[in-house]
């Protein structure tokens, strides 16, 4: 894999750290800025809102510009946003800075996924996307625990400054290691928006919104599940969550490997396995060893979906993948919101801490249903396009299909049907001069 993918992964690591570390820093932020912990939780929502707004907006503004320049600018934008967070004098300034920091998130992963796919051969694209996203998964293994520990000892502002340094290093690495990636010949906002006429693209996004909601229904409430049901001490939860991150990292890489060999089957199978393991978690959560093992599997199957779906969206977007790829990040945030919402409804109904994984299992199964339906529709479309077209006419006298001569491109301006081999021998080469008139060239 090219070193350029490492540069993309470094920035992804910084983005993942700043997104998820906020959850562990809420007590420090609330104490320092004199707000309640629930109010400090608005910082998470502000970041997610920034992702949803920024993904289409910044991608549209960057349409038609060279990808490398766009990636460097977005990485710099992200670092600057974190610097604003570190310097924020009060809570509302910090909330505004968190929204600003979230703006480049989706646009970076959208442009980065397309760039990663362009850096390798076509049969390695999903793996290249997985390498870039490995920075995001490693953030959950290393970045978030380290950021939380640093925040507890040196304050949350120190954590933000470290993320600024990592983000700046990522921007410099991209500028140094990523080769020039010019914008495609057909570019611009109108061209990118044209990709959304594809029904298959909308089905792919729907699998993310509904199916990945299952992952987040479990992940949103995993800490109280581990303490109240599995019996882990509060201090041990960090270690279990690190195992969760290990599963995410392995799943991300395996998902990319499998998607390069069988893209749609990988999406369908990953959702089915996620649904099964989430349902199993409601049982295995009652013992510590089985809960820890299942946590790894939830992370594995949950993130095996990511490179596969990202690659599927880019493929269905045809020649305009950047905006569609960025939109996936908005879809993941919608999945996060609805998964947490439906899991919370189950808890409010008094169904207990094991109910969110069961809700998640149902959502993941719905993603599998959508993925299978999309696959079946794609196969029907392929068979229909491969079937020979017939000459307009009715009745028994209708003639056979006219199949274009493989030696002659079927241009829109061609009016005459291709010549039969016998007629071609009489008049000369069908592709040669005078073939259309039946006269040999003089």
Image: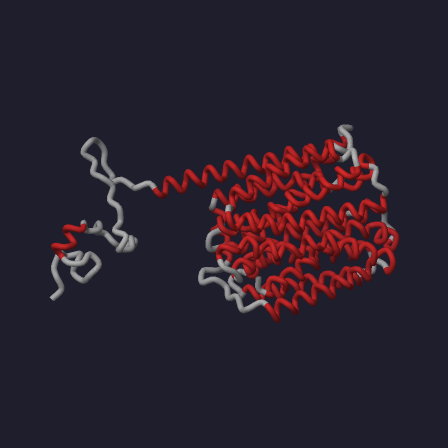
Image point (66%, 38%), residue name: 214
The C terminus, quarter of image: bottom left
At 73% across and 31% down in the image, what residue appears? Answer: 283
Q: Is residue 357 above or below residue 77?
A: above
Please say if 438 is above or below 312. Answer: below
Q: Position of residue 321 (x, y in %)?
A: 51, 54
Q: Nearer the viewer, residue 1 or 289?
A: 289
What's the colour scheme?
secondary structure
The answer to whether residue 96 shows anywhere in this view is no
Horizontal side of 274 relative to 424 (left or right) equals: right
Instruction: Name, please, the residue furthest toward the front.
Output: 289
> In terms of depth relative to the viewer, which is nearer, 282 or 203?
282
Query: Above or below — where is 241 with respect to 188?
Result: above
Residue 361: image quadrant is top right
Farthest residue to the bottom: give it.
176
The image position of residue 386, as x and y in percent, is: 35, 43
What's the residue at 45%, 63% (across, down)? 185
In the rendered image, residue 104, in percent from the top left (x then y), is placed at 65, 58
């Amino acid at each position: 894999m090219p070193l350029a993918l490492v540069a993309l992964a470094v920035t992804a690591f910084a983005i993942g750290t700043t997104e998820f570390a906020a959850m562990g820093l809420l007590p420090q932020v609330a104490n320092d800025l004199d707000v309640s912990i629930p109010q400090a939780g608005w910082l998470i929502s502000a970041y997610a809102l920034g992702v949803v707004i920024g993904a289409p907006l910044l991608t549209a503004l960057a349409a038609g510009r060279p990808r490398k320049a766009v990636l460097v600018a977005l990485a710099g934008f992200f670092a600057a946003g974190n610097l604003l967070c570190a310097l924020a004098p009060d809570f509302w300034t910090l909330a505004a800075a968190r929204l600003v920091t979230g703006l480049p998130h989706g646009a970076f992963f959208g442009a980065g996924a397309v760039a990663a796919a362009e850096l390798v051969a076509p049969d390695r694209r999903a793996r290249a996307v997985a390498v870039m996203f490995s920075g995001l998964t490693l953030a959950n293994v290393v970045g978030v625990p380290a950021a939380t520990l640093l925040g507890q000892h040196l304050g949350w502002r120190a954590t933000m400054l470290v993320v600024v340094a990592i983000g700046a290093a990522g921007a410099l690495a991209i500028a140094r290691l990523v080769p020039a990636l010019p914008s495609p010949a057909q570019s611009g906002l109108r061209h990118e928006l044209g990709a959304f006429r594809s029904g298959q693209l909308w089905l792919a996004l729907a699998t993310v919104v509904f199916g990945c909601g299952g992952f987040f229904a479990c992940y949103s409430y995993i800490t109280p599940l581990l303490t109240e049901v599995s019996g882990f001490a509060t201090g041990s939860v960090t270690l279990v969550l690190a195992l969760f991150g290990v599963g995410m990292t392995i799943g991300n890489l395996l998902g990319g490997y499998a998607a390069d060999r069988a893209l749609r089957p990988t999406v369908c199978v990953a959702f089915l396995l996620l649904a099964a393991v989430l349902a199993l978690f409601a049982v295995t959560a009652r013992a510590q060893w089985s809960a820890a093992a299942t946590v790894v599997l939830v992370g594995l199957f949950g993130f095996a979906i990511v490179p596969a779906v990202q690659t599927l969206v880019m493929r269905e977007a045809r020649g305009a993948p950047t905006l569609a790829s960025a939109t996936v990040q908005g879809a993941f945030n919608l999945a996060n919101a609805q998964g947490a919402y439906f899991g919370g409804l189950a808890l409010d109904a008094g169904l207990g801490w094991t109910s969110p994984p069961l809700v998640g299992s149902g959502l993941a199964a719905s993603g599998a249903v959508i993925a299978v339906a999309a696959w079946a529709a794609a196969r029907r479309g392929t068979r229909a396009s491969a079937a020979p077209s017939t000459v307009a006419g009715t009745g028994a006298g209708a003639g056979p299909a006219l199949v274009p001569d493989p030696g002659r491109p079927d241009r829109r301006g061609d009016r005459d049907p291709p010549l039969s081999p016998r007629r071609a021998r009489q008049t000369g080469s069908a592709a040669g001069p005078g073939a259309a008139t039946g006269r040999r060239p003089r």
